[in-house]
Image: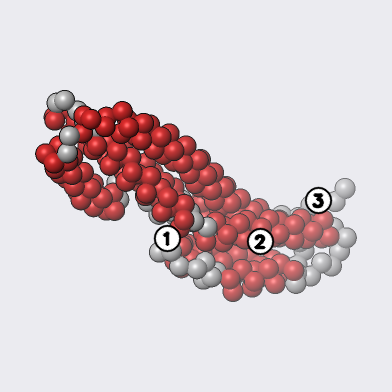
Amino acid sequence: MSKTFWIRLILGLPAAIAIQALLRQWVDLSADVGSVGAFVTAIGTLYSVLTGFTVISVWQQFTDTDRAVKREARALSELYRYVGYVGDSAGVSRAREAMKRYRERVVSDEWPAIVAGKPMTAGDDDYFQMADEVNEMNVASPRDVPAWAEAVRTLGEVSDARGERAVFVAQRIPNLLRVLLYIATVSLVVGMALLAFANPGIGAVVLAFTVVVSLLVLEVIDDLDDPFGGAWAISSARFEQIKLEAEKTMRPGRS
C-alpha cells in the first residue's frame, strides 16, 4: 500500500467514526432512516458504476502501456538482428552501437524520469541517431535490399511503440473525474454514518468496513493510473533483458 492510502486511512477512519458518534448524540437518526437508506442506495449505485467504469478504463490503459513497452523492446531486438543481414559492415557496426546507446539511455535516464512523472525526452537524440544510422546504411547489392527494407520496417515499429509509450506516460485520469470519485466516496461514507444502527458497535464496524473498502478502491485506481509507479509498475526489465551483444553478421547463402 502507498503512503497516501495509509494517510487517508489514519485520518479518514477515526473522523468517520467520530462523526457517526456525534450524530447519534445530537440527532434522532431513526426518524429518517427510510430517507437516509434511499440516499445510501442511490449513492452506492452511483459509486459502484463510477468506480467500475474507472477501474476498467485505467486497467485498459495500463495493459496498453505494457503492450507498447513490450513491442518496443521486441522490435529493437529484431532491428539489431535484421541490420546484420546487410553487407555494409561499417554501417552495421555504427547502427548496432547506436541501438546499444539508445537502449542504455532508455534504461538509465529515461525510465527514472518516467517514474518521477517527468517528460519522456531523455532518449530522443539517441533514437534519432539510431534511425539515421539505419537509414544511411550502404545498400550495395540486390541481396541487401530485402534485409535493409525489413530493418527500416522494424525501425518504424520501434518508432510507433515509442510514440505510444510517450502518449501513455502523459495520460492520466481527468481531474474532474477524480474529484467526482472523491465526492462520491465521501457521500457514501457520510450516508453510512447517518444510518441509525440499534447497536453502536455494529454501526461502527459497518462504517469502518465501508471506509476501508472505499479507500482500497481509490488506491487501486491511483495505482493503475500510474503505470510506471506503484505496486504494479511496468519496469524497464524488457529493455534490460534484450540481447544486443556483438554477434557474427549473418548473410544469406547463394542459391
- Specify the amino acid type for callout 2: Ser
- Specify the amino acid type for callout 1: Val
Q: Residue beneath label 2, please?
A: 159
Q: Residue beneath label 1, please?
A: 115
211 displayed left or right of 181: left
Query: Is 140 in front, or is 11?
Result: 11
Query: Is 84 in front, or is 9?
Result: 9
Taking the spot 50% from the left edge, 40% from the top edge, the residue there is 53
Taking the spot 61% from the left edge, 68% from the top edge, the residue there is 127
Q: In the rendered image of this protein, does residue 42 appear above or below residue 69?
A: above
Q: Is residue 122 visible?
A: yes
Q: Determine the secondary structure under disc 2.
A: helix
Mark earlier in primary sequence (2, 3): 2
What is the CA distance from the residue labelled 2 to the residue labelled 3?
Answer: 31 Å
User: Residue 214: horizontal and vertical position, in percent?
Assistant: 33, 40
Q: Which mark is residue 253?
A: 3
98 displayed left or right of 229: right
Mark earlier in primary sequence (1, 3): 1
Q: Residue furthest left?
A: 25
Taking the spot 36% from the left edge, 35% from the top edge, the residue there is 39
- Specify the amino acid type for callout 3: Gly
User: Residue 240: horizontal and vertical position, in percent?
Assistant: 49, 55
57 displayed left or right of 37: right
